[in-house]
Image (cartoon, rainbow, N blue to C red):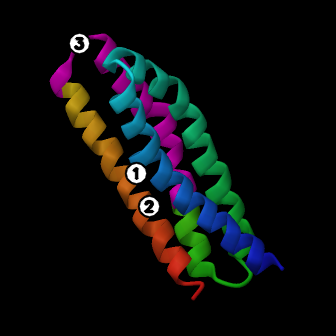
Amino acid sequence: MLEIVSLLLVALLFGGMLLYSFGFAAVLFSTLPAAMAGATLRRAFPHFYLFVIVTAALAALLLWPQDRTSATLLGLIALSTLPTRQLLMPAINAATDGGRKTRFKWLHGISVLVSLAHIVVSGVVLARFV
């Protein structure tokens, strides 16, 4: 039973990150004025990161008895999301607010790489169920 719940949590994590990264953000910027889309994303990101932290940590805890490698990978996702949420996101917002476009692009690039890495790692964990 724990393995089924773990599988569902990892699938939720993987799908949720894909949808948020490639669906939600893209839809916002294609349907709203840029300033409104940016403001909406700014308000949504803390919740998204909290979703990633909680879902990855819970799946890691449930998987630990059966698959320590997958549990460790999920734990790394949860742990690496903490500084992304608490440090990187505020720095991106400060760069945006201060009109520092080069700094924004650099920091945003880092956040994109972190998100892509999380998606890939959660996909690897998902594939390990097969």
14 or 99: nearer the viewer: 14
Which residue appears farthest toward the right when viewing the image?
Answer: 1
Disc 3 residue crowd, few under 14, some 14–19, many 20+, Cα 10 Å:
few
Residue type of the residue flagged with mark 3: Gly
**Mark sitting on residue 99:** 3
Residue that mark 1 sits on: 115
> Residue at (39%, 22%) from the top-left corner?
32
> Residue at (40%, 34%) from the top-left corner?
88
First in sequence: mark 3 vs mark 1: 3
Helix, strand or loop at mark 1: helix
Helix, strand or loop at mark 2: helix
| CB-based contact (under 8 Å), mark 1 and mark 2 | yes
Number of numbered markers: 3
Residue that mark 2 sits on: 119
| CB-based contact (under 8 Å), mark 3 and mark 2 | no
Residue type of the residue flagged with mark 2: Ile
Q: Against 52, is 105 above or below?
A: above
Range drawn in magenta = 77-102
Residue 65 % position (x, y): 74, 81
Residue type of the residue flagged with mark 1: Ser
- Quadrant placement of the C terminus: bottom right
The reply, left or right, for residue 91 in relation to residue 83 is: left
Disc 1 residue crowd, few under 14, some 14–19, many 20+, Cα 10 Å:
some
Q: Quadrant of residue 118?
A: bottom left
Query: Gap between marks 3 and 1, in whole Å?
Result: 24 Å
Residue 29 % position (x, y): 35, 30
Q: Against 21, is 7 above or below?
A: below
